[in-house]
Image: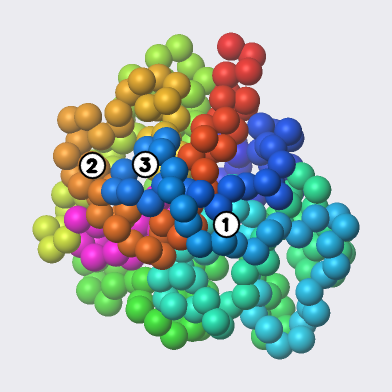
Amino acid sequence: MVSRSKSECFAGAYKSEASLNVDAIPIHIEVSHSFSMETCVQQARPPPLTSTSDPPPIFDGTTRLYISYVCPFAQRVYIARNYKGLQDKIELVPIDLQNRPAWYKEKVYPENKVPSLEHNGKVLGESLDLLRYVDANFEGPSLVPSDPAKKEFGEQLISHVDTFTREVYTSLKEGDPIQKASPAFDYLENALGKFDDGPFFLGHFSWVDIAYVPFVERFHLVFSDVFKHDITEGRPKLAAWIEEINKIDAYTQTRVDPKELVDIFKKRFLAQQ
């Protein structure tokens, strides 16, 4: 995932998930105003489909979003679906990437990765492309602002998101991850100061926040648990952004057990250290 700029999760892309039982993901997740390790009760979700699961009636006219609950790329589109109020328009189909059904690659998406969206007789992929597609083709609050300055700055931030994630992931493998990752988080702090009409990147909640939050969530948890460091220290705008985004149900409904996310990172980045 570090070297891959494409916005999706391959089946088996997270090496640290090899021993993770995706079917056992709890329905207890954190919904407080920070990314803490504490958990609380959350609404039940559909269980992930496995190699023994029957496929849904594919291409029957139903719009389906195929995801993995632990995939940050898939989480982006999951958030967008919820924020636009499309729970009744787009059916959620979670996939167990470690015990994936063969029919997903054979009949749904030959790329065999998530997220993917089944709509109007075709299947589309790439999370950032899907954010644009869902926003343009479905009803609900717009994710892209109409203001030209905000739209332009939003495109700049979207073009930087892969660089941001790559820099932080790389820092986890180096000697001083706190120092190495600092410029990446400083970039977010500075970007959050661009507009003063709200706490989000473009003032109001947008696709830019959706693109970044699954990764910031994970980085915040890992740096706190593993390195005993708060990435919001000295970054008040980032702290306010995290607090405000955790008030948005469309996002908190997509979160999984923080301990599972931290465990994934520990297995991947710390197992050989």
**Mark 2 or mark 1, earlier in chain:** 1
- Circle 1 sits on which residue? 74
Q: Secondary structure at mark 3?
A: loop
In which quadrant of the rendered view does residue 271 lie?
top right
Count how many numbered circles sit on residues in the image.
Answer: 3
* Residue range corresponding to the magenta coloring: 199-213
Q: Secondary structure at mark 2?
A: helix
Q: Residue at x 35, y 77 (%)?
A: 142
Q: Amino acid at mark 3?
A: Phe
The quarter of the image holding the C terminus is top right
Q: Amino acid at mark 2?
A: Ala
Regarding residue 159, the answer to whether it shows in the image is no
User: Mark 1 packing: few (<14 Cα in 10 Å), some, or many (20+)?
Assistant: many
User: Mark 2 packing: few (<14 Cα in 10 Å), some, or many (20+)?
Assistant: some
Q: Residue at x 59, y 33 (%)?
A: 264
Residue reaching furthest to the bottom: 61
> Is residue 37 covered in magenta?
no
- Circle 3 sits on which residue? 35
